[in-house]
Amino acid sequence: MDSEPPNFVPNPLGLGTREEEEVEEIMGYVVVISLPVILFFLIVAIACYLIGRARGREEAVRLPRYYGPPAPPVGVQDSQSLDK
């Protein structure tokens, strides 16, 4: 019979205790490095959104509209000119 406890789950990486400690140490570096990077990208994305929104609102106020009111249909213009 095996001497392993009934709830034994084999190590999926097949590493010993020293290798496991090294992997845990590396994973700690990954978490320490990735969290600030994620926060940095989040701050940059929010800043770009807010700057772009402000610039778009300035352009909307500053630039005139390209299109005026729609022209009336041709038949309406002719009937008004005939009445006069």
Image (cartoon, rainbow, N blue to C red):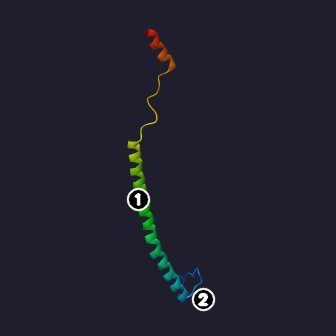
Percent position (x, y) of residue 62?
39, 43
Q: Provide the secondary structure element on which disc 1 rests.
A: helix
Which numbered disc, 1 or 2, marks the residue closer to the eye? 1
Kindly identify the residue that appears in the image at 43 percent across and 37 percent down: 65
Q: Toward which corner of the image does residue 41 lie, by quadrant?
A: bottom left
Marks 1 and 2, how far apart in space?
Answer: 60 Å
Q: Which mark is residue 47?
A: 1
- Residue furthest right as drawn: 1
Please state which of residues 66 and 26 is positioned toward the viewer in this rendering: 66
Percent position (x, y) of residue 27?
50, 78
User: In the picture provided, is 74 more to the left or to the right than 59?
Assistant: right
Percent position (x, y) of residue 21?
51, 86
* 17 in relation to 46, above or below: below
Pointer 2 local density, CA inside 10 Å: few below 14, some 14–19, many at least 20: few
* Dot 1 amino acid type: Ala
Kindly identify the residue that appears in the image at 59 percent across and 81 percent down: 13
Please state which of residues 72 and 38 is positioned toward the viewer in this rendering: 72
* Dot 2 amino acid type: Asp
Q: Provide the secondary structure element on which disc 2 rests.
A: loop
| Mark 1 in CB contact with mark 2 (< 8 angstroms) | no
Q: Toward which corner of the image does residue 40 lie, by quadrant?
A: bottom left
Please state which of residues 60 and 35 is positioned toward the viewer in this rendering: 60
Where does the N terminus fall, quadrant-wise? Answer: bottom right
For mark 2, what is the residue?
Answer: 2
Kindly identify the residue that appears in the image at 45 percent across and 14 percent down: 80
